[in-house]
Amino acid sequence: MQTRTVLWIEGDGIGPEVWAGARPVLDAAVEKAYGGERKLEWKELLAGKKAFEATGEYLPQETMDALRGGDLAMKGPLETPVGGGYRSLNVTLRQVLDLYACIRPVRYFQGIQSPVKHPEKVDMVVFRENTEDVYAGIEWASGSDEAKRVISFLRDEMGAAVDASAGVGVKPITPGGSKRLVRKALQYAVERDRSSVTLSHKGNIMKFTEGAFRAWGYEVAADEFADKVMTEQEANEGGSKPIVIKDRIADALFQQVLMYPEQYDVIATTNLNGDYISDALAAQVGGLGLAPGVNMSDEIAFFEATHGTAPTIAGKDLANPGSLILSGAMLLEHIGWDEAAKLIHASVEKVLSGGRVTVDLAGQIEGAEQVGCKEFGQLIGENL
Ligand code: NAI
């Protein structure tokens, strides 16, 4: 029998409920697809409140050591402890494990109300760089000594006209950081038979950061994927490689994905652009509450529910376990257990079209009947 170990973190708030709904579905899908030949082995790691109660630490050393040695992990949402010495547990995990690629697939499930006419044309995967850009946390408040020093350097030594009262932030974008992200997106496109990778950037304005990201992206494609990937121009000239690499200015891409969603497939982009486009696309298919995601380094793939701990509904059997279930399906695809992932997608589709759904989805499906978190998970399990 083939087993794969998944390190899992239950998470805070609705974490225990959504896991109780999700894990049986994942195990059942594997069982159904492979009849006992393959199995997921679950190893729990403590983090968040549960860890604090047991060990006095929100992210115990043992958890970090296990994650450093692992290759597959999944987590529920983690509450950021107030005054615990952390900016955020999620950010800490991303930084310590160097989870540089945030990957969000966006697809439509029949039956869900969407703000657009043809949500079924949306089938995209966003690769967002997770460690650089204005999110690097390098900024100084307006009027602070630090800001004044930076501004006087910029004015006196660099000849930049910066107002003395400005708050100042830094936007680092490196060749290494950009290339490893675009490489991951291209590898994914090759492995999953995707037709295009679009580099989204604001290089028309920010030439040496966003524009450089674009240039480095094309460089990786030419240097490392020349047998599989061609530019748009090469495609127009009759080229016949399976994947097209193209680029779009970020604001134009927001228009394009609304008007011509069928022309976009994998999107690779910098941190801030990626943050915006991931949520905008999820809204386009009406599925913010169902959106799965993964943060990856070269060593570990860390799948997660993209929502938070939803404290106001925690413990009330109201949460939707769908995001965690679909993240689990992503994990199965990631390890090549596609048959099990397909069973999950088909079952979710069937259950949604049956209209017995959790409260958040009930508002988005005409004539829907509300069921609890537990029952919704069971329905997905039964319809595999
Ligand atoms: P949230 O995602 O927890 O809640 C936003 C809204 O969506 C609420 O109305 C909530 O009830 C609803 N909601 C979220 N997940 C749901 C689900 N599975 N089923 C049904 N309804 C759901 O975001 P919020 O309120 O901004 O954050 C709450 C806490 O979660 C904070 O401590 C925050 O730091 C943390 N958080 C953790 C994340 C993570 O671990 N990846 C991501 C986002 C927030």
Image (cartoon, rainbow, N blue to C red):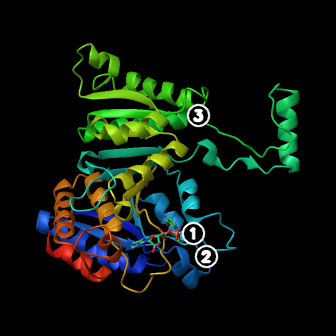
Q: Which residue is mark 2?
A: 57
* Residue 342 shown left or right of residue 209 in the figure: left
* In contact (CB < 8 Å): disc 1 and disc 2: yes
* Residue 312 shown left or right of residue 342 in the figure: right
Q: Which residue is mark 1?
A: 61
Q: Which residue is mark 3?
A: 174
Label 1 – label 2 distance at C-alpha = 8 Å
The answer to whether 33 is drawn above or below residue 144 in the figure is: below
Task: Work out whether residue 132 or residue 336 is closer to the camera in this orientation and state it.
Answer: 132
Residue 286: x and y, percent? 34, 58
Mark number displayed over residue 201: none
Residue at 16 percent of width and 71 percent of height: 354
Please name the amino acid that badge 2 sits on.
Answer: Glu
Crowd rating for badge 3 (residues with CA inside 10 Å; few <14, some 14–19, many 20+): some
The answer to whether 249 is drawn above or below residue 36 in the figure is: above
Label 3 – label 2 distance at C-alpha = 34 Å
Residue at 43 percent of width and 33 percent of height: 199
Provide the secondary structure element on which disc 2 rests. loop
Residue 110: x and y, percent? 21, 59
Task: Work out whether residue 67 or residue 361 is closer to the camera in this orientation and state it.
Answer: 361
